[in-house]
Amino acid sequence: MSSGGILQDTRVNILIVDGEQKNLTVLETVLDDPTYRLVRANSAEEALLALILDEFALLILDVNMPGMSGFELAQMVKQRKKNAYVPIIFLTAYYNEDQHVIEGYGTGAVDYLHKPVNPIVLRSKVAVFVDLFRKNRALGQANQALLAEVEHRREIEAQLKGLNETLDQRVTERTVALRNSEERFRQLADSMPQMVWTARRDGCLDYCNARWQAFSGLGEESYGDIAAWMPLLHSEDASGFLTAWYNSVESGEPYRMEFRLLDQRTQRFCWYLGRALPVRDEAGKIVRWIGTCTEINEQKTTEESLRRANQVLEQFAFAASHDLQEPMRNISVFVELFKERYGSNLNDEANMFLKVIVDGSRRIGNLVSGLLEYTQSAQRGDQPSGKVNAEEVFDRVLKNLEQASQESSAVITRDQLPVVAMNELHLEQVLQNLIGNALKYKKDDEAPLVHVSARGKDNEWHFTVADNGIGIAPEYREKVFGVFKRLHTGGQKYSGTGIGLAICQKVVESYGGRIWVESEEGNGATFHFTAPQPERG
């Protein structure tokens, strides 16, 4: 009498009651429909049990049944509250008088059919009552959902009422807490040695601590008035200060800039580092800015002194190396002339001494030339930095190293290289020194393999120059960038002045970049350096 599967929850129950099994079979055949669930009962007792267990959309009862008749069963069904509104269709083959029909309707029947039943009529009538049951059930479900929604809204209204009753109290408590927090912040800010300030989300100042007021001589009335404190800024810094600040306010990025401010107490301009960070709410929106101004005048003075000292040293080194070139050339030339003219008259010991003099003078000449090249390496000269195609520079370097490359049977390759923001000659210096070193420090039994690549990261290009040469021991990775630092000083196998990598470092660092090496002795070396990307626009 029951069936599993998907239809179990959607089918409509119909109770068919008849004392004859064959009559029940006929009814099942007539009412065969996948949306119906037909439940059999051979007696009134079975029908009552079925009505207790399930809900039915329709009862089809035979009037003449053994024991309790269909009329008596109908009366009992209508007396039960659960089944009082279940429609009943009577079937009979014996009672044809009007009084029996009236009796059937009197017991709560909705229809009275005579056997043999017309299948079309029966199916039509059953379909009407099933449709009515489905609509009533849907209406009941909708009504339950509506009642649940009403109850839910009542609960929400009760909650809102409770929230509203405590809203004023919570607002008052929050206001007091904010006021106390603001007071603590101002007390802390006033005790700091730095100038501390805050600004609204639009960048307009709304608070400055006591140190700022003492420094500037301005009070609270001037916080929102830019014109009032602009005279404190050095004329050379004012434009950059405002541009950087408004850019930060618009983008939400932290603010950082160095500028000079006029101290009203001493009437002198001092250098300050200004910084500000945005304060965001839970949604990530900026609600205010908190900033500081830290005096860096002593630091700037020291930096300027060091810059001037370095400039003097570079000028001295340039002048000294330039002035030494001519006498060193004279020494080399006249030593060679002396050897040609009088070398045959000298004994072996004298010729050995003469060879040492020749080699030493040549070595000194190379060192002087290297020193001159080093002092000039990071000077911008007449060619300002701009956009330079690294692939074109790479091709030019290959031509410069063509002879060395052929002699060593080297294979030099590259990936696609970018456009960088450097002086063209400076990039050429770096690539030529790094590739040239790879050709120089090759293994005896293996042709050099050199590969150059680059990838973009954080507004800069990261270059690598990798080779399969003799490599560098870990303890020498930092030392190789020192001036005149050479790892192979004996013999003529690895010639050089030890200044090439120092030049590379000076050039790269002059553009704010970094250079380093990764290597193991005997396993080649990979040199890394960074170069700035051109500005977009």
Image (tube, rainbow, N blue to C red):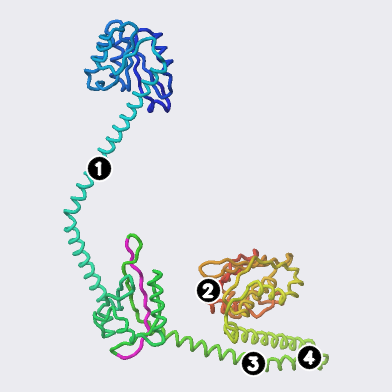
User: What residue sits right under mark 3 in the picture?
Assistant: 324
Q: Secondary structure at mark 1?
A: helix
User: What residue sits right under mark 2 in the picture?
Assistant: 537
Q: Which mark is residue 339?
A: 4
Look at the image and give the residue range highlighted in magenta. 266-281
> How many callouts does the rendering have?
4
- The crowd level at tag 4 (other Cα within 10 Å; few <14, some 14-19, many 20+) is some
- The crowd level at tag 3 (other Cα within 10 Å; few <14, some 14-19, many 20+) is some
Q: Position of residue 356 (x, y in %)?
A: 72, 86
User: What residue sits right under mark 1 in the picture?
Assistant: 152
Q: Position of residue 442 (x, y in %)?
A: 70, 69
- Which circle, 4 or 1, is nearer the viewer? 1
- The crowd level at tag 1 (other Cα within 10 Å; few <14, some 14-19, many 20+) is few
The answer for how far apart the CA atoms under marks 1 and 2 are is: 58 Å
- Which circle, 4 or 3, is nearer the viewer? 3
- Which circle, 3 or 2, is nearer the viewer? 2
Q: Position of residue 270 (x, y in %)?
A: 36, 86
